[in-house]
């Protein structure tokens, strides 16, 4: 751990880590993906491979299956992966942080090592048909029985890759009378529990990322609740805040690669690219630098022991803007990628459209910034 928020620790140590990781990657490259292998299955194999080398959960304490290093070590690994254009460390960091902060000692010891190794695959059951942005309005209800267990009824929606998961971080109301933000609790839900139905939804692009989750009289034990009753709201806020750091997700170095490609194209096709497009490339480069500065700041704060908070909404907005502009510009500069085999830029372009929705929509991020960071009065219509 470092003394000041701007001290990024011993660079030699990080250089060594980077060097070791690069060497490991030479011997353990990204495996081939058979044409018929679903993406989550492929990514799970990659997750296990990375874990076998000790490259998952670097910032998780050793007693919970991690390496007990810092956030910067984990970010360095994500950065290296992104810079090679290969999938990042599986996006479990935000779930791990929620468990570290709210789980009991027994839960951390039992659940975290299996989460990090990929023995347990998790999904996130927050959104509902009537409660996406307005999570506080969720209606899934976990009724506590005198014997101590809960019976859960309700429906979740947009649960990514639930059909490939064994466990779900579930939010449910445990008190119908209390104010919304103190009446939601979090649970570990095994998806093979009687009463759970997982129904994949096929999206317009053919992907089956999303699922509906139906919960009919599902029994959960008290030991399956994470944190105290009512901790579900702060746990959810911790989870989504950690979903928003572009460095964590390895997105930054991936953007960096594409910006470099755009920069080269601007040089090579000087005089033929329209001025407007050159300005767009310039804006992308500026977006990227702003994002780098923010991501570094968040990482520094985390190194100093601060938890992610409402500031992460600024990061999410910046990331969304940077990502959407970048892929829009890339498609204009490389229109052949619209039609080419593989069409990686096109795939990323489409997924970038979802960035203003997942993890909280852009409007909701602006509301959080207005209310919690700027202290502005509530919307008169709210
Ligand atoms: C790729 C992807 C993956 C996802 N994965 C998961 C997952 O694994 N688990 C999970 O639980 N959820 C997941 N989601 C769901 C996501 O969290 C919700 O879609 C998101 O929170 C928005 O909720 P909603 O879709 O119900 O839209 P709504 O809340 O109905 O919003 C509709 C529109 O109204 C606007 N709006 C709503 N309220 C306000 C307000 N108060 N002020 C201003 N504007 C407002 C919104 O910004 C939006 O434009 C995923 C979504 C996507 C796109």
Image: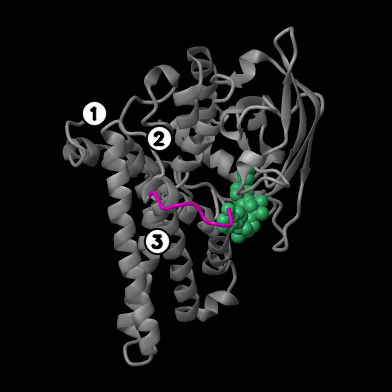
Where residue 199 appears, as percent x and y from the top left, is 79, 43
User: With respect to residue 67, does 77 lie above or below?
Assistant: below
Residue occupying image coordinates x 73% and y 29%: 141
Towards the viewer: 149 or 250: 149
The CA distance from mark 1 to mark 2 is 19 Å
Nearer-N-terminus badge (2/3): 2
Please state the extent of the stretch shown in magenta in the rendering. Answer: 375-382
Q: Which residue is mark 1?
A: 1
Of badges 1 and 2, nearer the viewer stands: 1
User: With respect to residue 370, does 102 lie above or below?
Assistant: above
Q: Residue furthest front?
A: 380
Towards the viewer: 270 or 33: 270
Q: Which residue is mark 2?
A: 55
Image-based side of 121 in relation to 220, left or right:
left
Where residue 208 appears, as percent x and y from the top left, is 71, 52
CB within 8 Å, label 1 to label 2: no
User: With respect to residue 358, does 28 lie above or below?
Assistant: above
Which numbered tag is attached to residue 255? 3
Mark 2 CB within 8 Å of ligand 1: no
């Amino acid at each position: 751990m470092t003394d000041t928020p701007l001290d990024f620790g011993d660079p030699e140590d990080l250089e060594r880590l980077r060097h070791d990781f690069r060497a490991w990657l030479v011997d353990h490259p990204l495996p081939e993906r058979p044409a018929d292998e679903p993406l989550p299955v492929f990514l799970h194999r990659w997750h296990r491979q990375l874990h076998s080398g000790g490259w998952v959960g670097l910032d998780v304490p050793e007693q919970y299956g991690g390496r007990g290093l810092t956030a910067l070590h984990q970010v360095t690994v994500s950065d290296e992966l992104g810079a090679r254009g290969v999938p990042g460390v599986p996006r479990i960091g935000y779930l791990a942080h929620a468990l570290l902060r709210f789980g009991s000692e027994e839960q951390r010891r039992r659940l975290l090592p299996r989460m990090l190794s990929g023995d347990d695959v998790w999904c996130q059951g927050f959104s509902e048909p009537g409660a996406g942005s307005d999570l506080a309005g969720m209606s899934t209800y976990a009724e506590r029985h005198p014997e101590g267990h809960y019976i859960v009824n309700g429906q979740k929606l947009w649960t990514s890759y639930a059909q490939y998961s064994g466990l779900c971080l579930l939010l449910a109301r445990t008190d119908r009378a209390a104010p919304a933000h103190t009446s939601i609790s979090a649970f570990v839900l095994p998806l093979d529990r009687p009463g759970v139905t997982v129904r994949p939804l096929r999206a317009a692009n053919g992907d089956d990322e999303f699922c509906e989750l139906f919960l009919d009289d599902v029994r959960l034990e008290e030991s399956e609740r994470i944190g105290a009753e009512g901790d579900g709201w702060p746990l959810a806020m911790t989870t989504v805040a950690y979903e928003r750091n572009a460095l964590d997700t390895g997105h930054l170095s991936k953007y960096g690669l594409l910006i470099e490609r755009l920069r080269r194209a601007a040089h090579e096709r000087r005089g033929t690219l329209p001025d407007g497009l050159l300005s767009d490339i310039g804006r992308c480069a500026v977006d990227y630098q702003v994002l780098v500065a923010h991501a570094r700041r968040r990482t520094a704060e985390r190194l100093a022991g601060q938890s992610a908070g409402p500031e992460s909404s600024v990061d999410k907005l910046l990331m969304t803007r940077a990502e959407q502009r970048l892929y829009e510009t890339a498609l204009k500069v490389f229109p052949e990628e619209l039609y080419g085999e593989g069409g990686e830029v096109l795939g990323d372009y489409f997924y970038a459209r979802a960035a203003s929705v997942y993890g909280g929509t852009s409007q909701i991020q602006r509301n959080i910034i207005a209310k919690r960071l700027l202290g502005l009065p509530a919307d008169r219509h709210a």
